[in-house]
Image (cartoon, rainbow, N blue to C red):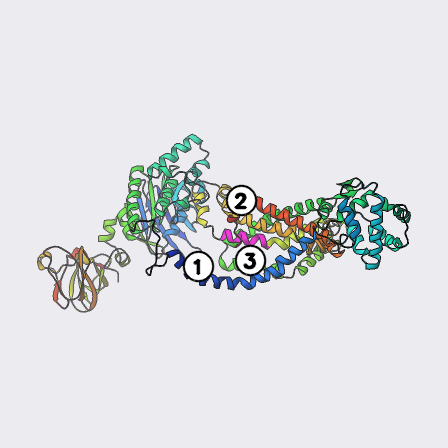
Amino acid sequence: MTQEPRNDAFVAFEHVQKSYDGVTLVVKDLNLSIGKGEFLTMLGPSGSGKTTCLMMLAGFETATHGEIKLDGVNINQVPPHKRGIGMVFQNYALFPHMTVGENLAFPLEVRGMGKDEREAKIKRALDMVQMGAYANRRPAQLSGGQQQRIALARALVFDPKLVLMDEPLGALDKQLREHMQFEIKHLHESLGITVVYVTHDQGEALTMSDRVAVFNDGRIQQLAPPADLYERPENSFVAQFIGENNKLMGTIEELTGDKALVRLTTGELIDATAVNAKEKGHRTLVSIRPERVEFKPEMMPPGAHTIEAEVVEIIYMGDILRAVLKVAGSDDFVMKMRNTLGQTKLSPGQKIKVGWHPQDARALDP
Amino acid sequence: MAEATNELLTTADGRPLKAALQAAQARAKRRAFLLVLPLLLFVLLTFLIPIGLMLKRSFEHDGFASSAPALVAWFEANPDFNPADPPEEAYAALVQDLARMQTDKTTGIAGTRINYSVPGTISLFKKGAREAGDLTPPFKESLVAVDADWAKPALWRGMASASNVYTAEFYKVASDFKLNDDGWARGEDNERIYLYLFFKTFLISAIITFLCLLLAFPVAHLLATLPMAKSSLLMIFVLLPFWTSLLVRTTSWIALLQEQGIVNDLLVGIGLIGDDGRLSMMYNMTGTIVAMTHVLLPFMILPLYSVMRVIPPSYARAARSLGATSWTTFRRVYLPQTLPGIAAGSLLVFILAVGYYITPALVGGADGQLISNLIAFHMSKSNWSLAAAIAGMLLASILLLYWLYDRLIGIDRLKFG
């Protein structure tokens, strides 16, 4: 997916390409505009080019081709220390030989700021991350979560307009990570800064971002707000990368507007919405979220096609029940049911009919 | 959680926990001790004991005390005698001892011992011993008649001092003190060689350490930051000289730097200097510094490399992103983190340089000699006690430096790799 560069964009990548070895492109023709105050996440598997993009924006890698603009100015040739971009690193990169206070003073000192002003800013930044009492500690004396907060404070203390975060929560445990996600989001909102966040954790991306750019193979596969990304994936990579998905292979039998009737390879007919398989006779991969699969006729829209299924296994997961079904020849079709009081109990071997709202089945590229 | 109690903890079968723990560990401890025992014995026999015996010679010498019993007894009875005019009975004891030396053939040993503090004594003793049998009282007059030097107060002071097996004389000599007629005093300016050489050794070692640091820092940084394949190749270039014989390396420097050597030929060839203006870079201090810097360079590179290798590049990136120029990043973020390596490398190179022998002996000429060459010189002249005293002072000054270093920087911050 590409996007025409906007003139009012705060950060803009225009036709950016990057190659390390002169043989292969790590980033292939990247076009991306980030608005002022936006929280944009670059999400993708490792090697997809997302970190390279962040490094080019920070100035640690040079673009092989194309322009990177910050606030309308081309920054391709601007060295990193003159870009005024705050950055939070994966391993925090707090200077081990300096105290927390000295770490925070560093960006202010190199800007020639006076002592009083410096101390006021350091205090404000530490209070902002609730670490006001730790100015005299060394980074090694802090826990991972505390170091993370200090790294955040250091990236913000010199009031940058843009903050980059390179998988900053990767080293924290699940609970702390969720807590920090909330805090970063909160800081972003209260400070009005622009954040570019890199992660491979889709949950993190969906929770925090205004928009998510899904990277794969050096390209942005889809750039959309989290809900769109989850509910309306535009290609099979995004559909499979974000969340869990059932995949059914088939060919388009009938097409009325967006509505498609897909004949599966095993012969059954199902309803779907044509997304990027838009011609009759085309092969397609239909993707359906497990929680949108229904087996009670009253929950399906009138006239919906249903398909035979056999229960293979029921997995009890607390809040939900997960049914593994044998559908259209594959035996890893998943249906999620809410664990409510009146929920129908299914048992292995039971034959049922499953269906879904045509909007929830998306006919994508095979 | 169990609450802490003051009760003695016991194992399940009632033994005290501490005793049980010790018993459980005793076997492992015994095994560990047995494993290090061969090395311990080896170090003890080949290193600690010889060094101890050698250092003992620096303050113990019985060459005179054992061969002149009569005079030793007299000195003991008259500790406050006047060296300018010893009485007749002292001369009588001396003549008696000289005659005994002649029969025991110990004249040389005794003379040599006195010779350390009073030069020229060996021949005096030999002459005196030959005549001793024929001398008649009064011995003072008859011995002085053999050689007037027998009346020298310095000689009597020297003999009185040497009558004690334990002495600080060798340390006094090694500190440029001289025994003259009025006792020990600092030698004339042109005679002070030892302390000057100590000073020069430390100065040259400091220069070499500094040069090594200057040359090693960028190399170590390259080694630590280059991709693996290239850094391995570079590492071989660093280690290759390390594996080459010291003699080969030193003599190649001679081939390069001597007056008819490659560097001079090249400079003359391109017309930078005239044929009569060839630079003397060998057999002097320049030669010593150049060759030793080269020889000791790996000892600086390796500790630096081991420290630099584990400094993540994200620190420098963080500093740059926070607005620091590359110079500020180096000075305030990178350099402080390499300090343990700099400290370790400098200490290693300095201590090695202070005691270095082969290279200055081969390329140092007259003016590039270090204190170790002087130790070797005295060893070759069988003046082991003086050599031991100089070596002892060298060892003491290195230990002092080490102590200072520990106080200032802390030994626990060292990283050798």
Say if A136 sits above or below A298 in the image.
above
Pointer 1: what residue? A23
Element carrying mark 2: loop
Marks 3 and 2, the one that precedes in the sequence? 3
Q: Residue at x 44, y 55 (%)?
A: A20
Q: Which amino acid does label 1 sit on?
A: Val
Please tell me if label 3 and label 1 are on a single chain. Answer: no
Of the numbered discs in the image, which one, if any, rests on residue B409? 2
Q: Which residue is drawn at 37% across and 42% down?
A: A150
Q: Which amino acid does label 2 sit on?
A: Ile
Callout in the foreground (3, 2)? 2
A250 in magenta: no
Q: Find the distance from the CA under tag 3 to the CA under tag 2.
A: 31 Å
Q: Which of B49 and A246 is in front in this view?
A: B49
Q: Give the range drawn in magenta.
A: B298-309
| Quadrant of the rendered image containing residue A307 | bottom left
Element carrying mark 3: helix
Q: Nearer the viewer, residue B52 or A199?
A: B52
Q: Is residue A225 toward the left or the right of residue B232 in the image?
A: left
Callout in the foreground (3, 1)? 3
Say if B96 sits above or below A150 in the image.
below
Q: Which residue is drawn at 12% across and 67% down?
A: A350
Say if residue B276 shows up in the picture: no
| Quadrant of the rendered image containing residue A107 | top left
Q: Where is residue A231 in the image (x, y as percent from the top left)?
A: 22, 53
Q: Are marks 1 and 2 in contact (CB under 8 Å)?
A: no
Pointer 3: what residue? B234
Q: Mark 1 lies on which chain?
A: A
